[in-house]
Amino acid sequence: MLNGVINVYKEKGYTSHDVVAKMRGIFRQKKIGHTGTLDPDAEGVLPVCLGNATRLSDYLTDKTKCYRAVLLLGVTTDTQDSSGQVLSERPVDCTEEALRETAAAFLGPQLQVPPMYSALKVNGKKLVDLARRGIEVERKPRPVEILELTVEEVTLPRAVLTVRCSKGTYIRTLCHDIGERLGTGGCMESLLRLSTGGFSLENAHRLKELEEAVQAGEPERYLLPTDACLKEYPALSGTAEADRFLLNGNPVSAELLEELDSAAAPNLQSEEPRPEERSAAEPQTEERQTAEPRPEACRVYDSRGRFIGLYRFEEGNENRPDRYRPVKLFLPES
């Protein structure tokens, strides 16, 4: 079984589930999953996880994303994109300056109402399934954040937007809302995902490329190791003595781990003394009060360099020493 992540270029006309189904056939393995839905008409970056990397989903979906979209003013649809049924058509009498000012007003944190044509569920039912039956239900606004919004080109009634945003942001809804605020209405005409997390369009591969690699006997040609997607976490390496704990998914003593990358790994010993070691008369310095916190988690490898998983530090007590406890294990699957 292959374990790792492939940066797939999702082509127009495929759903994200279609891509997964195609890859299961190409690589002849069932354990494959995508890391974030793209609409069928959208194109671009879609990281797909294989084998033990399917456990990465929570870490890859919770990432900043970047899109290029074409906003079509003057038209509103039931899906908020140009593939839907037209609900209204209005004249586009706004200026380019008004468009740019209105788009800029959407920068920052905000509440966004998800579209009915989406995969979100209400009372266990997908909104899109309800919408296709002509049923509209109330949707609670969700917090999202538009980190950057650049109007790249304006040829009214169209405008090209580049948007960097938080997870959960619907670009269709953003286009719709900009149009409503301008008074012209609007919908999304096309969408290209440029990047998500550390994956970018420049390194994305089409399904045909993957199929050709497998036919050439090189199924791992475009496969990224599972741990390559977690480089933001410091790395620790276990000693041979630590292997029996690591390979069984058990907590491991901090004494059995050492920094794998001195520039990124955390200090195993805290700079601040434990309470029982500190003199009652000893004043706490400003340096100690503002000591840098430990990282949320660390990548841990066994003595042979195999990636085991993400571990979190736990300070010891009188009954046990400092240790690292597993948060998410990625033991190789065969």
Image: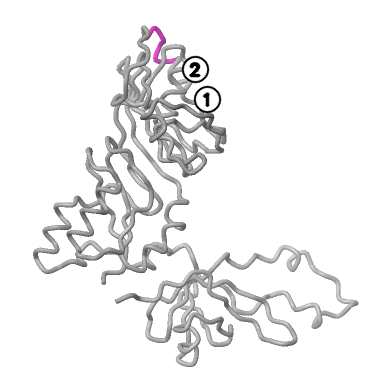
Residues shaded magenta? 92-97
Which residue position holds label 1? 105
Which residue position holds label 2? 181
Judged left or right of residue 193, residue 247 is right
Question: SS for tag 1?
Answer: loop
Residue 310 percent across, percent down from the top left: 49, 70
Foreground mark, 2 or 1?
2
Rendered position, 323 above or below 117:
below
Q: Dot 1 surroundings within 10 Å: few (below 14), some, or many (20 or more)?
A: few
Residue name at image x 37 percent, y 33 percent: 162
The amino acid sitting under disc 1 is Ala
In front here: 306 or 128? Answer: 128
Q: Residue furthest bottom?
A: 241
Q: Are marks 2 and 1 in contact (CB under 8 Å)?
A: yes
Image quadrant containing the N terminus: bottom left
Residue 142 percent across, percent down from the top left: 55, 37
Counting residues from the start of the chain, the first of labels 2 and 1 encountered is 1
